[in-house]
Image: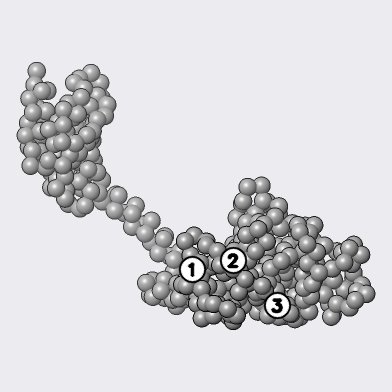
Amino acid sequence: MVSVRSQGGRPAVVLDRTAFYPEGGGQPADRGLLGGVPVVDVQERDGEVLHVLAGAPPAGRVLGEVDPVRRRDHVQQHHGQHLLSAVFERVAGASTLSFHLGEEVSTIDLDKGPEALGPERLRAVEAAANELVYRDLPVTVREFSEAELARLPLRKEPARGCRVVVVSEGPLSEAFDPAEVVDASPCGGTHPPRTGAVGAIAVLRAQRWGEGTRVEFACGGRVVAALSEALRNLREAAAALRCAPAELSAAVSRAVEESAVRRKEFERLFAAAAQAEADRLSGSSGLVRAVLAPPVAGAAAWARAVAQALAARGRVALLGAVEEGRAHLAFARPRGPGPHLGERLRAAVALLGGKGGGSADFAQGSGPDAARVEEALREAEKALAP
Ligand SMILES: [Zn+2]
């Protein structure tokens, strides 16, 4: 151990050498143990690698253990990204602008819009990237001399240093032939010795991202996890719709259609019932003042439909309906000259402690003081008296 610093209130150890990868280049930091103490973060500051510890730092010579499962996951996502970026460049002429390896989702941002990256092209890119995985090509990660760099078909300019990750058709010889190089990208991240370690690459989704496209993808173990989660969702949805998972899309279409037909049917019956209620109420003469008992949920819609049906019969209607402790009012009259019902309704709902309004011939509103609904309607009727 070289020294101990502080990072976010925790001890951060600097070593003379380390296998821990510090966060950077779109890739999260490693975790693990340092002398038995959990490493909760690894950051690079001023050329030093800080190992942030969960507890008091051990003394003297320390043994570091990188969490192998987390490291493998990062290697799979990161190298999968290299392969995907190489294929996007070759197949779609789309360059990678940035890369992010998330805890759940990883993304590549490309400089081409989604119109250039339709579903068929994405499937072609995915297939070509997986081909590179299945062929289990050698991956060389080392520093290259200026002369070598000049011969490498680099996918992007080196940002710092001359460490390059090269995927080649065969083992990369000293005097390599540039034609053997499948992909060469300057990078300081963690990579496997062969492409096969990526396991599999799945392109999950592509969406517009500024001028370009953000592509979500998963590699290796995350493909299996994503598939298992997708299957669980399908099974649950299929169980809810009482069908086999394979019949899900047909069952959903059918359910949506049925629901639309039923909604239309319900609206027709609701309107017919409101007409019948208006017929019943228009039996007496003069203004119709009543607190209604809606036949189904939806007191506001019911009061509105009945009030409008009464107005269509040439009547002035002052209606109320109570639902779940809230009073709903709807006032309506035939069009033409007459009192301003919007103003009357505002005064009436104020008695109920609520709000509402409308035009001269139709208005609606509601308030929480449902016990005063009769009183509010009586007051509104008094105000309309000539
Ligand atoms: Zn990389």
Which tag, 2 or 1, sits closer to the chain's start? 2
Crowd around label 1: few <14 · some 14–19 · many ≥20 (10 Å): few
Q: Residue at x 89, y 78 (%)?
A: 173
Q: Residue at x 9, y 18 (%)?
A: 386
- Which SS class for mark 2? strand
- Viewer-proximal residue among 187 and 183: 187
Residue hosting label 1: 249
Residue hosting label 3: 192
Q: Name the amino acid type tagged 1.
A: Ser
Q: Residue at x 71, y 52 (%)?
A: 111
- Viewer-proximal residue among 81 and 91: 81
Give the x, y percent position of residue 376.
10, 33
Give the x, y percent position of residue 191.
70, 74
Crowd around label 2: few <14 · some 14–19 · many ≥20 (10 Å): many
Crowd around label 3: few <14 · some 14–19 · many ≥20 (10 Å): some
Is residue 364 visible in this depiction of the protein? yes
- Which SS class for mark 3? loop
Is residue 288 visible in this depiction of the protein? no
Residue hosting label 2: 50
- Which SS class for mark 1? helix
